[in-house]
Amino acid sequence: MIWLVTIIPSGKVLFRTKVFIMIIALLAITSGIALIWVSAEKLENYSVHAAREFGFSPFFIGSTVIAFGTSAPEMLTTFFVSLENKGSMVIGNVIGSNVANLSLVFGSMLLIVSLKKLRIKQEVAIQKNLLILLVSGLLIWLIIAIDPFNIASSFILLTSLILVISFWYKNGVSDEGESESDLDLPRFVSLKLTLSLAFLVFAAWLITFGANQILDEFSLGELFIGYTVLAIGTSLPEIAASVSLALKGRYETVTGTLIGSNIFNGLCVLAIPGLFMNPKMSLGWSYSEWSPLLLILFIITFIFAYYIFSVSKKERNASILLSLLFLSSYFVSLYFAY
């Protein structure tokens, strides 16, 4: 009887402790997402203004600056997770963000367009970026299959990114940025850009802190936490922005930004952990647990590319069935992540 009396209070204390930790973790994650929502948009806008001050072309701004702005949350969360030597969470963040971009973001855009019975017409020039996306996707798959956590892998990815940026700079063939009339030129752009980046860093730390608390207390696995909490948390601003742009009929902007963001996620974000040159990063790493998710990412990327290629040739109505296919693919992938 004394044993029962001592066990029950300790059980209550343990339960209350877990609940308290869960509340703190959720508060950190939601606060971080809210900060990312605001600061990522500001960072993107001020980056465009700063790039224009240096005379960069609209296509270069759209492909690099805006894509960098939307990928900044993923880069920062990956940096903080790498400090914790959680390799699987890093890969989960990269793959999960790219899958979320194509399935949730593009799927939401197609659903809105379908329900409003609008027609889509994409710029033919965007096909070049689609080819880069497909080639970079194959490179990412190869890097993850071999070893994504060494300096050689980081060097290959960053070199590829530099080549892509050089191509974008020399081939300004599309306008994916905002027009001057769409954006008010603010004062003190550099200062506001720095402040936006500082808030974004703090937001990324909050999300990483919350994710680590959930991981430590509830043993959900690095893979699942990275694929869901980090990936969705850092992709929410893109989802909101894409829905807003779709309602305004700016489908080419949504598509261009998604392509650029996924290229940045793969070539830049995935290169971060290897720069730490820490062998502990790869402990517990298994390619076999990621191969189904990589296959899902490749399939939806191929379907996405095929659809954009066909739309580039002529206007067409968006398909509700196709939008539901994209949206459901993310939830199907959760089964393999868990």
Image: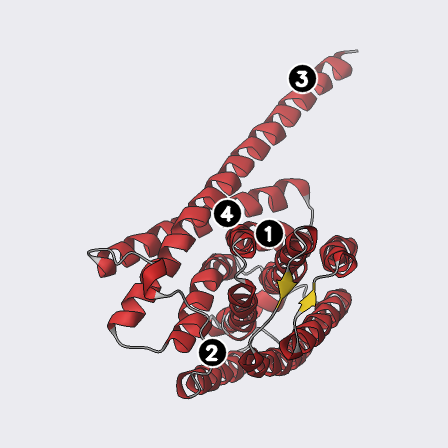
Query: Which quadrant of the rendered structure holds the N terminus?
Result: top right
Q: CA distance from mark 2 to mark 1?
A: 29 Å
Earlier residue among tags 2 and 1? 2
Of residue 110 and residue 159, the one placed in the foreground of this image is 110
Earlier residue among tags 4 and 2? 2
Can the viewer see residue 140? yes
Q: CA distance from mark 4 to mark 2?
A: 35 Å
Of residue 108 and residue 298, the one placed in the foreground of this image is 108
Mark 2 falls on what kind of element?
A: loop
Earlier residue among tags 2 and 3? 3
Determine which residue is flagged by label 1. Answer: 232
Residue 294 is situated, as x and y percent measured from the top left of the image, at: 72, 69
Q: Which residue occupies 71% across, 72% down?
A: 298
Mark 4 falls on what kind of element?
A: helix
Earlier residue among tags 3 and 4? 3
Determine which residue is flagged by label 2. Answer: 174
Nearest to viewer (mark 4 / mark 2): 2
Determine which residue is flagged by label 4. Answer: 207
Q: Which residue occupies 29% across, 56% down?
A: 184
| Callout 4 crowding tier (Cα within 10 Å): few <14, some 14–19, many ≥20 | many
